[in-house]
Image: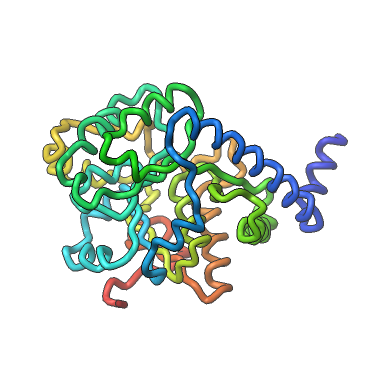
Amino acid sequence: MLKALLRGLLDAPAGLPARLLMGVIWAQKQSKLLARWSEASHFLPLDIRELSKRISSKKYLFILASGESVEALSSKDFEMMSRHTTIGVNAWPLHPFVPDYYAFEPFDPESRDYVQLFTSVLSQQRFKVNTPGLLLFRPHSDLDLSRYSLIPEHFRPRASLYSRFVPVTRKRKTLGREIKGLHEAQELGLLGKSNVMDLGATVIRMISLGYILGFQNVVLVGADLNGGRYFWEANGDHLSRNGLTSFSPGFSRPIHETMTRANKAFVMSEVVEEFSEIFHNEGRKLYVASPSSLLSTFLPVFRWSVE
């Protein structure tokens, strides 16, 4: 009874200062943990402010996920993306379009497919010219560390580890203000130089990174979340081109894992909607690239001719 009462007070709007303090303390612990994994892996911690200096334009950030809607993009769409900043998420190396960065997270311990992604796909010649940067979410275990050690040598100088800060609230009505408050604390340097916000999805982390870096427009490509196919399932050429016969993301459907609540307080669409409101209030935009995405029910659909 007392525990439930205290939780209710913490989740209330008046509990924001306490939640932010908890978030700062937790993020600082994450920074120390990240430093230990950095020393063990020999990958440097990500310095978000230095990353910001290396990005020539902050007009558009395209976050590239793996939904079937990727197959509807035209060569002109990819040409446009190539003129801006792009981050491919997890399985994106299966696609021939090479972005500026890849963002990986520790994957299913049973997945042999991701091992092949690191050892075979990333070893291809196309990645040895203008090698993309790697944004590696910090390991959870020695097994994750051993998997990251498989990353080809030509990527290693451009790889860095990052970690996270997380909202404390379990109530949707106080989530948006806490997300905003945590990012304000991050801007003040209170949450560490290598931490972005996380609620269980790489796409969420990259939206947070895009927000911190100051992008005016963030476009979610292939973030369908509707239980459909992945782009390599819709077009088998993506597998054969990479010498693969199949590729599993490590979990089953009918709906995307980020849309299952399980023990989580929020599903991905709820977090994206809160981010969208924050972007909108600052005169910035968070878009989805395809009208077939579940996110198009509340995000504006990006017009590729807008440039």
Q: Residue shown at 33%/26% (left/top)?
A: 111
Residue 263 vs 47, above or below: the answer is above
Q: From the viewer's perspective, is 23 left or right of 158?
A: right
Viewer-proximal residue, 149 or 281?
149
Coordinates of residue 205 in the picture (x, y in percent)? 49, 49
Looking at the figure, which quarter contains the N terminus? top right
Q: From the viewer's perspective, is 271 left or right of 244?
A: right
Viewer-proximal residue, 64 or 46?
46
Viewer-proximal residue, 40 or 264?
40
Viewer-proximal residue, 87 or 275?
87
Residue 220 vs 249, above or below: the answer is below
Q: From the viewer's perspective, is 236 left or right of 187?
A: left
Q: Does residue 153 show up?
A: yes
Q: From the viewer's perspective, is 191 left or right of 91?
A: right
Residue pushed farthest right? Answer: 2
Coordinates of residue 223 in the picture (x, y in percent)? 37, 53
Q: Does residue 259 show up?
A: no
The number of numbered discs placed on residues in the rendered structure image is 0
Q: Residue shown at 53%/68% (left/top)?
A: 279
Quarter-of-image position of residue 185: bottom right
Q: Residue shown at 61%/39% (left/top)?
A: 30
Q: Residue shown at 41%/65% (left/top)?
A: 287
Coordinates of residue 195 in the picture (x, y in percent)? 55, 48
What's the image's color scheme? rainbow
Residue 199 vs 1, above or below: the answer is below
Looking at the figure, which quarter contains the C terminus? bottom left
Coordinates of residue 250 in the picture (x, y in percent)? 36, 30
Quarter-of-image position of residue 271: bottom right
